[in-house]
Image (cartoon, helix red, strand yellow):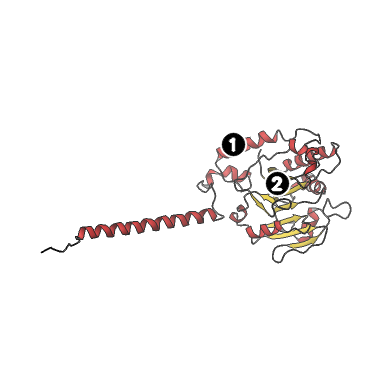
Amino acid sequence: MDTPSITTRPNLDSKIFRSVSFIVIVIILYCSTIYYKRSIATPGHLSSSTIKCDQCRLSMIESDGWFCESDSNWQRRKLVHHAQDRRNNVTDSRFLFFQNNWESTVHCEFEQRIGRTGDGGKWICDIHRFQQMNETNTLVYSFGSNGDFSFERGIKEKLPQAEIHTFDKGFFQCPDGVCLFHQAYLGNGKINGTKSLENITQELGHSKRDIHILKVDIEGHEFNLFEELFGSSASTRKNRLYIRQILFEIHLGSNMNEQMSRRTHRLFSLFRANNYAIFHKEVNLDNPQNVFEDMIDDNYLLMKIVLN
């Protein structure tokens, strides 16, 4: 008579152990995946997060708390900046002026385009840093919207607590809960009823506040605006508005003489003298037939940084 087979206790324990081990491994892998996804999606996560504060003191001081990287990497970044900066003022010729002059000298690790693809949107350097720096009252000025509020919407999505003010010579209505609209003719505040940036901040009670992002697209009046802002004497320089990032479109117009080229060089020299560096340059191809005559406009994006 056959004896029924009996599963031995050791075999049973082995199967249970393998099953439990498999479940534990799956749980560990799942939790690790969730942690990784959350860490890279969290605004506070930086590639330099492993660097201690005392290891990036130099870069934090010279970038006004923006970049945290080792002293050796920071020194290398400065060498790259100075090498390109020496080559930025090449020629006064209007032929391919923007092709031959003023390239970016600083590069941002997490640069991101905010707003429309094409005209209207702008690149911003590491926008998550505004959240990391615990800026609960982030102030954004947008000069020249022409009724396009895609940039403002994009800012609000990334920085829900941001206070956004939009200005244009025409009259438009900001989307609810996104921005506040002001009708104003922008310039140097001295001619044709224009208002300077200083006029604007005084009227709105922002004279003592930092402007974190300033977007400017005012069809040629950017020269008067910035020359008035940065061209004042050294005695007033310490009281000058602090602007973290400037995103602006520059317009040379259709006059092909070299006067506007020289004025453009002077403008960028003003930016440089006030510790602004170019982190992005983008051509506006709204009128492509003008590319080879360089009657096109260029977008320049600057950030406040000391790179002596």
The picture quadrant where one finds residue 276 is: top right
Q: Which residue lies at the image location 59% right of the left edge and 43% below the top edge?
A: 59
Residue receiving disc 1: 76
Q: What residue type is labelled 1?
A: Arg
Q: Where is residue 44 in the image (x, y as percent from the top left)?
A: 55, 54
Could you say whether the residue bearing mark 1 is in a helix, strand or loop? helix
Residue 301's disc number: 2
Q: Which residue lies furthest to the left in this view?
A: 1
Q: Which residue lies furthest to the front in this view?
A: 1
Please determine whether, in this image, residue 204 is positioned above or below residue 252: below
Left or right: where 300 falls relative to 68: right
Q: Where is residue 229 in the image (x, y as percent from the top left)?
A: 78, 48
Q: Which of 121 and 233 is in front in this view?
A: 121
In this view of the protein, can residue 82 be seen by the observer?
A: yes
Q: What residue type is labelled 2?
A: Leu
Q: Quarter holding the C terminus? A: top right
Nearest to viewer (mark 2 / mark 1): 2
Left or right: where 32 falls relative to 169: left
In this view of the protein, can residue 211 be seen by the observer?
A: no
Q: Which residue lies at the image location 66% right of the left edge and 33% below the top edge?
A: 83
Q: Are marks 2 and 1 in contact (CB under 8 Å)?
A: no
